[in-house]
Amino acid sequence: MVRRSRSIPPPTVIDREMPHQVALPDDICTAHNFTLIQRFLDQRGVTCRTRSVIAIWEDGVQEEWRLHCFSDAAAAAAFLDHFGGIRFDPKRDRENGRARGVWRRPGAFTRILEIGPLSVPEALRN
């Protein structure tokens, strides 16, 4: 039987306690960009949990996105202002608010290579 780690709360708890969420494409949150994000959070003394969600566009393209979850709305707004991204509402943006639901995105898929001070590392661009 697989047991959940006691140090990592379940997705429903994260959504309830940290409802202010900002979504960034997963491949833009790696390498040096991960360090930039962590430094930003550390300098402000902000606590953030990350989760992932699969975004599915109308043309059927799927991409993994990383959710940066905050309990404080001001911290989420500062993160959004600095890095860009998309405000994500866990109750509205997932299928019927299901904690493990997908994120239905309108329109056709367009890959994001740069957003705010972050850019996809060269090795992940192809």
Image (cartoon, rainbow, N blue to C red):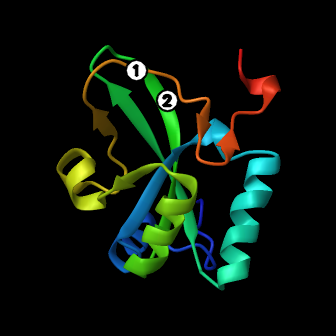
Which amino acid, by three-letter code, is at mark 1? Phe
Q: Position of residue 13 (x, y in %)?
A: 40, 75
Asked if residue 31 is positioned above or below residue 9 in the image, the reply reads above
Quick check: 61 above or below 47?
Answer: above
Q: Secondary structure at mark 1?
A: loop
Residue 51: x and y in percent read 52, 57
User: Is residue 28 at least partly visible in the picture?
Assistant: yes
Instruction: Give the position of the C terminus as an image quadrant.
Output: top right
User: Sequence order check: which comes first, mark 2 or mark 1?
Assistant: 2
Residue 109 position by quadrant? top left
Residue 31 lies, in percent from the top left, at 81, 45
* Total labels drawn: 2
Q: Is residue 71 visible?
A: no
Quarter of the rendering occupied by the N terminus: bottom right
Q: CA distance from mark 2 to mark 1?
A: 9 Å
Where residue 118 appears, as percent x and y from the top left, is 67, 45
User: Badge 2: how crowded within 10 Å, few (<14), some, or many (20+)?
Assistant: some
Q: Is residue 23 left or right of residue 126?
A: left
Q: Quadrant of residue 102?
A: top left
| Label number found at residue 109 | 1
Residue drawn at the location 65% of the way across and 40% of the way down: 28
Q: Looking at the picture, does residue 8 appear above or below residue 24?
A: below
Q: Is residue 8 left or right of residue 124?
A: left
Residue at numbered disc 2 = 63
Q: Are marks 2 and 1 in contact (CB under 8 Å)?
A: yes
Q: Secondary structure at mark 2?
A: strand
- Which three-letter amino acid code belongs to the residue tagged 2? Glu
